[in-house]
Amino acid sequence: MDNLVKDNDQLTDVKARTVQERRQRMAAALSSYARALTFENRSRRNLYRLAGLAPRTRDRLFSIMLMVIVGVTLVLPMLGSIGYYAFLASPGYASQVRFIVRSSTPLLSRDRYSSNAVEPKEKIVQDTAILLNYLQSPAIIQDMQKHVDLHTLFGAERIDFLSRLPTESTQDDLLNYWEKHASTYVNTKSGIVELEITAYTPQQAHDLVQLVLRLAEERVNKLSSAMWDDLRVSTQADVDRATQEVADLRGKIRDTQNQTGVFDVDMSARQLASVLTAIETNIAELRSRRIALGDAVSSRAPQAADLDRRIAAAEEQSQKLRAQIAGSSSNGDVNLAGYSTVFDTLKLDLSMAEKRLTAALKDLEKVKLVSSLQLVYVDNFIEPTMPDSNKYPNIPLSLFLSLIACLGVCAFVCGILVMIRKQLD
């Protein structure tokens, strides 16, 4: 009996020691775990979670806000994008055309109307650059409005509300809308320009491309026509000056002929030479008769005196004629040789003036011909296409881009919310 009591006492002591040790070990473990939580994770929210306690109201509020943000920035926009692109978006038809700019200006006299610094190739490059800038400028809108009502074309009720041109759109709004529906690309090596215009029916897209090509061609030619108008005025002034110079020189020759009495120097010289020959022949005959008469009668006879007077008069006349042809006259008048110099000078000036007049007339005819022609051609070697299917919208690509954008916005907003929650913890 005593042994049994002793054994029970020992067993009770062992159990007591075991329970006490377990309590001590549990207390040490809890203390160590609490210290670890305190130093390794300072978020009270995580302490509550690790301790198995219910989340606080603020944590529930942040969770609700995260769900709302995901719904607003990701779920709803994607649902809206799917609905819009799949059911509401108006199909956009793109008509394309490829063209080059050609110049038909003939080469005029290079020394006057062109220089080494301006080559035809550079002129074509400049015209192409002007055309590309015109296609994206307000001028194309103003010119198109004269032929088609863009507000009616792009603002029809059948077009969806996002793609439609607003009714009260301004000129700048219309230009921005046009820039989104018209695109150009130029190959710098070949100079080929690719134009693409998007409309909401195939026929509208095709007609707009043809209209833009015609307006661009007219615009480039209008720039060159002003230059040729000025050139035509300049060449006409040259013709007027040359005509007046020729008229003045001809009048001067006429006045000189009236003053000198000489119509033509060569003709006058031939006439004077003929008269002088006749006088010389008459003098020779008179001298022969005087010699024959001197053998028959005295030198003081009336017949001999008459022949002497006639011979002297003929010789004086002969000397005057010789002086008129060449030599110096007794009264200081200009002889035929001097007149020849005057007339040769006047005729040379007249000939040069006539040549200048001829050249000016040729230039004027060239300028008139060129200015009446079309100087620049927009040569579309590929006809504008008639689209069979819509190019826009590209539903898979549009949805993918929308998803990327929504994910980016959602991640950004959620990141800000998480940072705020950490700061509050």
Image (cartoon, helix red, strand yellow):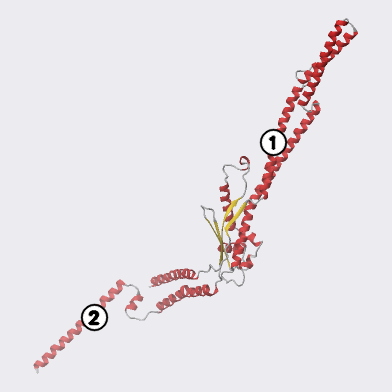
- Is disc 2 surrounded by few (<14), some (14 to 19) or many (20+) residues within 10 Å? few
Secondary structure under badge 2? Answer: helix
x, y percent for residue 219: 63, 55
Residue type marked 1: Lys
Please report whichever mark, 1 or 2, sits nearer to the chain's N-terminal start.
2
Disc sitting over residue 355 in the figure: 1
- Place of residue 198 in the rendered image (x, y in percent of width and height, measured from the top left): 57, 65
Is there any visible trace of residue 278 in the rendered image?
yes
| Quarter placement of the N terminus | bottom left
From the viewer's perspective, tell me whether residue 361 is left or right of residue 101.
right
Residue name at image x 58 percent, y 48 percent? 123
Q: Amino acid at mark 2?
A: Met
Q: Which mark is residue 26?
A: 2
Say which quarter of the image contains residue 163. Answer: bottom right
Q: Is residue 42 above or below residue 285?
A: below
The 10 Å Cα crowd at callout 1, few under 14, some 14 to 19, many 20 or more, is some
View extreme (top): residue: 298
Quarter of the image that includes the C terminus? bottom left
User: Considering depth in this image, is 213 or 80 the residue closer to the camera?
Assistant: 213
Residue 187 position, x and y percent, is 52, 55
Q: Secondary structure at mark 1?
A: helix
